[in-house]
Image: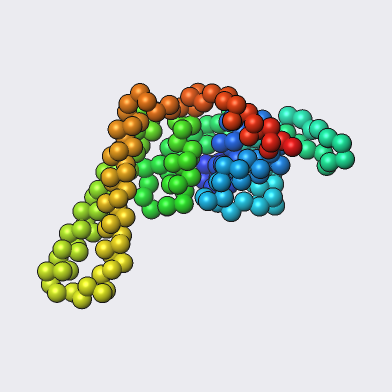
C-alpha cells in the first residue's frame, strides 16, 4: 500500500518545504538559512541530510527543479520550487501535528511553522492541544495527590512532579499565547511577513 506524502515527511522535509514557501532556493542556501535561524535547535542539520531530503521530496513530487546556475569556480547549483502538492502537504502536516501531545519533536517543528496557517486555524488547533494537555495534567496532578496521601516516598515521585510542573507551565504559556494570537498586535499567517531589510540581508548572505 502506497503511503501518502504526509506520512513520509521527516522533520527536515517539513522545514525544507516551509523554506520553499518563502521563495525558490538552492540547497546550499537552505542549509545556511536554517543555521542562521538556529533551526539546528530542532533538527540536526548536515549538508548530506539536507541534500538527501531534497532528493526524496523531488521524487515524491513535492518540489521541482526550476533552474541551475554556476558562479565562478563554484559547483553548479540547482534551484528548487514548491509544487502545489508540496504546499498542501506542509500545511496538512502542521495541522496534523500541532494539536498532538505525544510527539514533542514534531510538535516543536509544527509550532515553528504554524505561521504558515491562518490565525483562526492555528488558534483552533492549539485549543484542541490545550484540552488534551489539561486532561493529562489533571490525571497527573490527582495521581500525585493520591500518592502523597498514601505515604508514597517522595523521592520516587520526583520525575512525576517534574512532568506535572512542565505540563502546568505549558498550559500557562498556551493560555497567554492564545490571548496574543486572538488579538491584533501579533502579525500572523502566510502573508504576514514583510520583506524587511533584515530578512533581505539574511537571504543575500545565505546565497553567497
Which residue reaches farthest left? Answer: 149
Which residue reaches farthest right? Answer: 73
Q: Is residue 123 above or below residue 102?
A: above
Q: Is residue 90 above or below residue 150?
A: above
Estimate the x, y position of residue 113 in percent, counting from the top left.
Answer: 49, 38
Name the quadrant containing residue 62: top right
* Image label count: 0
Name the quadrant containing residue 76: top right
Q: Is residue 206 visible?
A: yes
Q: Is residue 59 visible?
A: no
Look at 37% across and 25% down and name the residue there.
Answer: 185
Q: Is residue 152 above or below residue 201?
A: below
Look at 71% across and 35% down and name the residue there.
Answer: 207
Question: In the depicted view, which residue is nearer to us: 59 or 175?
Answer: 175
Q: Quadrant of the C terminus?
A: top right
Look at 58% across and 24% down and name the residue there.
Answer: 195
Estimate the x, y position of residue 158 in percent, counting from the top left.
Answer: 28, 68
Look at 56% across and 36% down and name the residue there.
Answer: 18
Estimate the x, y position of residue 2 in percent, counting from the top left.
Answer: 57, 45
Left or right: residue 94 compared with residue 128: right
Amino acid at each position: 500500500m502506497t503511503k501518502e506524502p504526509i506520512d513520509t515527511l521527516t522533520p527536515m522535509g517539513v522545514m525544507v518545504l516551509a523554506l520553499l514557501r518563502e521563495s525558490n532556493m538552492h540547497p546550499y542556501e537552505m542549509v545556511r538559512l536554517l543555521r542562521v535561524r538556529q533551526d539546528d535547535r530542532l533538527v540536526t542539520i548536515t549538508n548530506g541530510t539536507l541534500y538527501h531530503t531534497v532528493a526524496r521530496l523531488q521524487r515524491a513530487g513535492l518540489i521541482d527543479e526550476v533552474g541551475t546556475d554556476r558562479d565562478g569556480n563554484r559547483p553548479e547549483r540547482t534551484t528548487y520550487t514548491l509544487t502545489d502538492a508540496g504546499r498542501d502537504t506542509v500545511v496538512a502536516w502542521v495541522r496534523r501535528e500541532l494539536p498532538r501531545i505525544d510527539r514533542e519533536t514534531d510538535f516543536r517543528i509544527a509550532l515553528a511553522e504554524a505561521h504558515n496557517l491562518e490565525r483562526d486555524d492555528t488558534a483552533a488547533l492549539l485549543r484542541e492541544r490545550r484540552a488534551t494537555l489539561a486532561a493529562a495534567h489533571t490525571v497527573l496532578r490527582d495521581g500525585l495527590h493520591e500518592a502523597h496521601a498514601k505515604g508514597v516516598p517522595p523521592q520516587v515521585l520526583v520525575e512525576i512532579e517534574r512532568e506535572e510542573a512542565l505540563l502546568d507551565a505549558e498550559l500557562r504559556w498556551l493560555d497567554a499565547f492564545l490571548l496574543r494570537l486572538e488579538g491584533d498586535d501579533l502579525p500572523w499567517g502566510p502573508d504576514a511577513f514583510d520583506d524587511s531589510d533584515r530578512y533581505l540581508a539574511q537571504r543575500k548572505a545565505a546565497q553567497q
